[in-house]
Image (cartoon, helix red, strand yellow):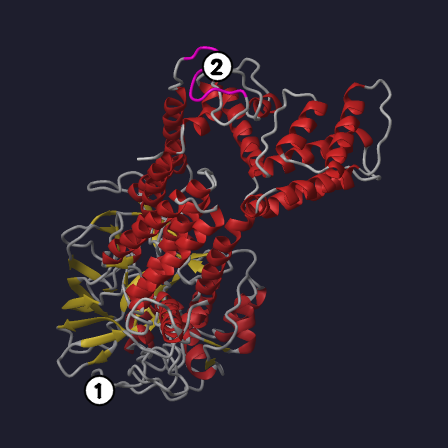
Amino acid sequence: MSGRARLAVCAAVATLCAAGALLPLVDPITWMFEAAILLALMSGVGAAARRVPLAGPLTIGVQALAAVLLMTLLFARNEAVLGLLPGPDALAEFGRLLQAGVRDVGRYAIPAPVTPGIRLLLVLGVLVIGLTVDALAVTYRSAAPAGLPLLALYSVAAGLSQGGAGWLLFLTAAAGYLLLLLAEGRDRLSQWGRVFGGPVAGADRPGGGRGFAAGTGVPASAPVRTGRRIGAMALGLAVVVPAVLPSLGGGLLGTSGNGTGPGGGGTISAVNPLVSLQDSLNQPEDKEVLNYRTTASDTRDLYLRIVALDQFDGTTWKPSERTVTDVPEQLPRPPGLSSAVDLNRINTSISTAGWYAQNWLPLPYPASRVDISGRWRFEPQGRTLVGDRGQNTHGLQYQVESLQVRPTSGQLAAAPAPPADLLREYTKVPDSLPPVVRNTARRVTRGAPTTYAKAVKLQDWFALNGGFSYNTDVRAGSGSDAIARFLRQKEGFCVHFSFSMAAMARTLGIPARVAVGFTPGTKQPDGTTSVGLKDAHAWPELYFQGIGWTRFEPTPSRGSIPDYAYPATPGTADRGSPAPAPSRSAAPSEGPSADPSCGPGAQRSGSGSGAGSGSGCLTLPAENGGIRPPEDGPSPWATAGIALAALLVLLLPVAPLLWRLRTRAGRLAAAGPDGDHAAGTLAAWQELQDTAWDFGILPDESLTPRKAAARIIGLGELQPEPAAAAQRVAAAVEQVLYAPQPQPVSGLAAEVQQVRAGLRDAAPRGLRLRAQLAPRSVARLRWAWSARWTAWLLRCRSSRPVVSVRRAAAALRPGRQRA
């Protein structure tokens, strides 16, 4: 097998290794086999085109054409001409699949099903990256830049994957890239190996040998050993450095710290779960998240709780970093719950949807026992279960024993003060909180004799008599003024109401936090209860000693106000002028009913078209491990990500051209009349040499400027006028380098342009295209970075003076090696 054939195989393998990071995103993984077959066929077409041989751009064009035909055969065979040629119908089918794929990306949580649209996006993405890698590494023999598209492919997958793509997938992708680098040949690796393993001659350099150590005639094995050492070092740094840096976590929250395995403690790292909230609240389609059967006779208060947000920084609420433990067989008794409070034990069997995948487990509160398989951990403060090492709620079935706590209004009114440490932690408010929040809380609760009476007054002010309205179209806002703006405008959705009531309760000295989860859902004819996206909700929890954390409902006409929120005696709380309370049926309705937690008038059918059919209360986004509702189109973030990836793919092939144009413009400007004479002359000479290099004439720095110009004139077959221009530039360089008093020479920029025009006129069409689109002198950019990396490594290995960056760069220039 020839060197280029081996390199083509390695390029395809490297692409597939990087594409492996996409595997956790979808289920099943059969698309990967299709992508591998198409990639192999496209690589084979490229190998055949290079054996003809065809020019580089033509080779890439033939491969692209082959990819189009293969994609047509796979995805639009019925609409294609002769089942293979993409006609108008086939193009329309591709457009429909692309649109459906983008919509499905926004519709499903990870792991998403492989719909035809998603399958097209995956296979097409792998082929585009594979074609780019093959063009850079094989057609133009530049394996190092081929790492950019591979990195783009891996980074997109790792960014979308819940908790990242995982260390094994990272090692696989990195190994594929290193394999590509090693396969590029001894001549490329010798540029690195001569610093680490001794000088070797370059294969393609003037005067250099091929694969032998300088002056010895002994085969140079150092480059391969050096490549392995560099690869091992790079992988080691990539694995070790993230381990010692603070973890960013993954999903809604990620387990980190020591002891995340069985028997360990570990911690929970908080991540804000309210990203992209408002977009989630305005989705028109209600989709079932889970369903359950329960022994409870009354499910009005059977809220399914996901997480408690107990940290308030003035901008938002989020979960604190907490210690997690193994899930005990019997969960501890809820803190603060007295035996005098009436409670019922109920059992609930829950099944989650296959598309629903998040880190935290929905549970009735407070749960006393959970029977579930998988890797789950228990967080005692919030009494929640969190998945460990990638565990999520995808298609689960589990049993929960929980308590239905039924305190009376009298018990809540008579509750003693909570413990000092709990009071201190859960009444913290930042100094940045606007004074209007505290002042409004005091005004609303004026005259309330007990903490419980203050809580009821706050709830009624929001839900009944404060003039607030439910509206998911208002600007969500952020920052410390968000609550003040909501109190002034008096419209918002459940997050506004729960956040504001909890913050106001804290200013009154009442321990408070915000819970996120689902309202009870809708009873189905088969006896189960269905919980959909529009049942997602947020509500405040206030702490009362003897009862524990207690739910309140400030969002107007959403959820259900609990029985204990109605005072039993006239003196317990002054309710002012109460408005009619929401009607409460004995049980959930048998058929579709108005959405209990979200948009006004929304029905629990998938085609709700009322005013509130697009509303909801809280949806945890898929990128944070939570709910991702179905959408009519891609979210702004998904659109921006796709556009950025497409822009990156489009810019990669023209990046060398852009860099070369910028470099040429800078050098010619330096050679102008306004620049420094000596620096401008040397810049013009550097540009002339690189221009010749772009047309296949490697620079030889061992030659004098006069001889170097003669070499360019001869090899470039320059006509008299451009040849004379090259000689004039060389003479000006000799003046600067050797004359005691150099004489200024004007018009060097024009001379260089004349030489470039002469080289272009004498070159064949393929060479002209190569010099324009993929200039060889771009290698200087890679050498500069390699030199800096080399100098840094040498400084790390020794405290004595090391080779400077300039000397390291000079060692890598062509023509500096001796046979």
Lower position in the chain sequence, tag 2 or tag 1: 2
Q: Amino acid at mark 1?
A: Gly
Dot 2, how many residues are within 10 Å of its Cα: few (below 14), some (14-19), or many (20+)? many
Residue 542 placement (x, y as % from top left): 36, 65
Is residue 208 covered in magenta? yes
Location of residue 188 with respect to 276 vertically, above or below: above
Query: Magenta span covers which residues?
Result: 207-217
Q: Secondary structure at mark 2?
A: loop
Q: Residue at x 46, y 51 (%)?
A: 58
- Which of 610/769 is in front? 769
Residue 695 placement (x, y as % from top left): 59, 39
Q: Is residue 270 left or right of residue 339?
A: right
Residue 159 placement (x, y as % from top left): 40, 52
Q: Amino acid at mark 2?
A: Ala
Number of the label disc, if any, that sits on residue 591: 1
- Which of 809/72 is in front? 72
Q: Is the residue under label 1 in contact with that under label 2 (CB below 8 Å)?
A: no
Quarter holding the N terminus is top left
Q: Is residue 454 left or right of residue 728?
A: left
Is residue 763 covered in magenta? no
Q: Is residue 395 left or right of residue 62?
A: left
Location of mark 2 (residue) = 214
